[in-house]
């Protein structure tokens, strides 16, 4: 009886493993900026108006606070050093399938004092959006999360920055920061169908086992 139960459990786990949708890989390279640089990204123009920094870099100027992990975390910073940014962008092109739906997410915030605006878009997939972040020098709470979906028509490019002459009205005391950029494919309907089929298989195996146990007890 034990061997039959073990065999049934193994089959059930196998069905579940085959039916479960695979985890989608992040299509963005170095989306968390933990390389300490813009590896994988294109910075335009590359003039130092956007840098990869950490919370510790902001302690001398802004008295940032937070856990050790947050103070050592890397992120992209727009306009550091009390400079006015104009037309500075960071972007990355990634491969997509036409008609496929994708999830995107990223964290954004601001350090210093005041509020800051920055533009975000996914070219060929999502229209331009303007983000506003109010400065918060507590790194444990500075980030907001932006999420959404888009349908791609071809390869796509994700872009952050001053895309359309946006006036940096708070350039002298606030920096927009960005972290954990992610784009992942939404599972196709066929994948979900396989998942449902797997659960149906689990139910059938359980039904057969119950019937066999009832017959053996009769």
Image (cartoon, helix red, strand yellow):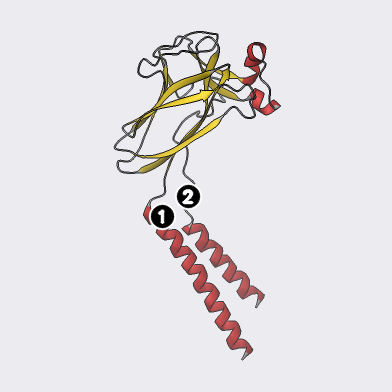
Considering every residue shown, the one lying at the far bottom of the view is 218
Quadrant in which the N terminus appears: bottom right
Name the residue nearer the viewer: 119 or 12.
119
Q: Mark 1 sits on what residue?
A: 191
Instruction: Please name the residue shown 45% across and 32% down the image.
Output: 28
Instruction: Please name the residue shown 47% across and 63% down the image.
Output: 198
Q: Residues within 10 Å of mark 2 (few under 14, many from 20)?
A: few
Instruction: Give how far across and how far down residue 93 sits, in percent.
Output: 38, 28
Return the disc, 1 or 2, that comes first in the chain's sequence: 2
Name the residue nearer the viewer: 185 or 83.
83
Residue 158 seen in this snapshot: no
Q: Mark 2 sits on what residue?
A: 22
Instruction: Give how far across and how far down residue 193 sits, in percent.
Output: 40, 59
**Relative to 123, residue 37 above or below:** above
Q: Quadrant of residue 148?
A: top left
**Marking on residue 212:** none
């Amino acid at each position: 009886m034990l061997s039959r139960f073990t065999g049934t459990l193994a089959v059930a786990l196998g069905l579940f493993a085959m039916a479960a949708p695979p985890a989608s890989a992040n299509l963005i390279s170095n989306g968390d900026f933990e390389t300490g640089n813009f590896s994988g990204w294109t910075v335009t123009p590359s003039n130092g108006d956007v840098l990869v920094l950490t919370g510790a870099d902001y302690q001398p100027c802004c008295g940032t606070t937070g856990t050790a992990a947050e103070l050592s975390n890397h992120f992209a910073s727009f306009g550091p050093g009390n400079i006015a940014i104009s037309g500075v962008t960071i972007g990355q092109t990634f491969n997509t399938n036409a008609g496929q739906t994708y999830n995107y997410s990223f964290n954004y915030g601001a350090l210093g004092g005041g509020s800051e605006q920055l533009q975000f878009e996914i070219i060929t997939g999502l229209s331009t959006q303007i983000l506003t972040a109010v400065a918060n020098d507590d790194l444990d709470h500075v980030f907001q999360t932006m999420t959404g979906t888009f349908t791609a028509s071809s390869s796509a490019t994700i872009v952050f920055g001053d895309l359309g002459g946006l006036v940096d009205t708070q350039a002298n005391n606030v920096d927009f920061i960005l972290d954990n950029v992610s784009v992942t494919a939404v599972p196709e309907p066929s994948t979900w169908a396989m998942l449902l089929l797997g659960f149906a298989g689990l139910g059938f195996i359980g039904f057969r086992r119950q019937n066999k146990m009832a017959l053996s007890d009769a």
